[in-house]
Amino acid sequence: MGHAIAVALFLHLLGVAVWVGGMIFAHFCLRPALEDLSPQLRLPLIESVFGRFFNWVGVSVIVILLSGGFLLMQLGGEHATWQLHAMAGLGVLMMLIFGHIRFAVFPRIRRAVQAQKWPDGARAVGTVRRLVVINLVLGIVTIGVAVLARGF
């Protein structure tokens, strides 16, 4: 394996670890820990945490997209295996869902927190939660497809 491919694979896997690992943390650790807090405490905390996390995911998405595109071209381009094309397709779908969360739904949380409209914020957080679950499932399926691509 060439140096460039090894570096691209490392960056790709690092981006995936940050994104998927962050979703697992947010869904299975942070969300349950915040359930007992009142909306006045919970929603500003969620807004603050997601604001930071979404910046990390944004960087991860760029790294995953660039490294994945490079790897796809190095490993056959349009003639690459179906698993590589499946990973690319699932990754793009995940990125589109993340874009919707970040640029359509998250601003609703931010506005609700600023205006102290707790029911509006809670609805937006529920939407984020559902979309994160979808992305988490897609991420796990994509990792499974990556294992299949190894051809053990």
Image: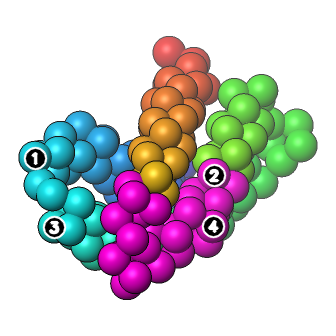
- What amino acid type should be assigned to the residue bearing mark 1? Asp
Could you tell me how far apart the alpha carbons at marks 4 and 1 are, in whole angstroms? 27 Å
Could you tell me how far apart the alpha carbons at marks 2 and 3 are, in whole angstroms? 27 Å
- At x 50%, y 15%, the residue is 152
Residue 133 sits above or below residue 68 on the image: above
The image shows residue 3 at horizontal and vertical percentages of 50, 63
Residue 106 sits above or below residue 124 on the image: below
Check contact, mark 2 vs mark 3: CB within 8 A. Answer: no
Say whether residue 147 is left or right of residue 149: left
- At x 56%, y 63%, the residue is 105
Disc 2 versus disc 4: nearer the observer: 4
Q: Which residue is mark 2?
A: 97
What SS does tag 4 mark? helix
Check contact, mark 4 vs mark 1: CB within 8 A. Answer: no
Q: Which residue is mark 4?
A: 104
| Pick the front one: 28 or 68 | 28
**Can the viewer see residue 23?**
yes
What SS does tag 3 mark? helix
Residue 149 image-quadrant placement = top right
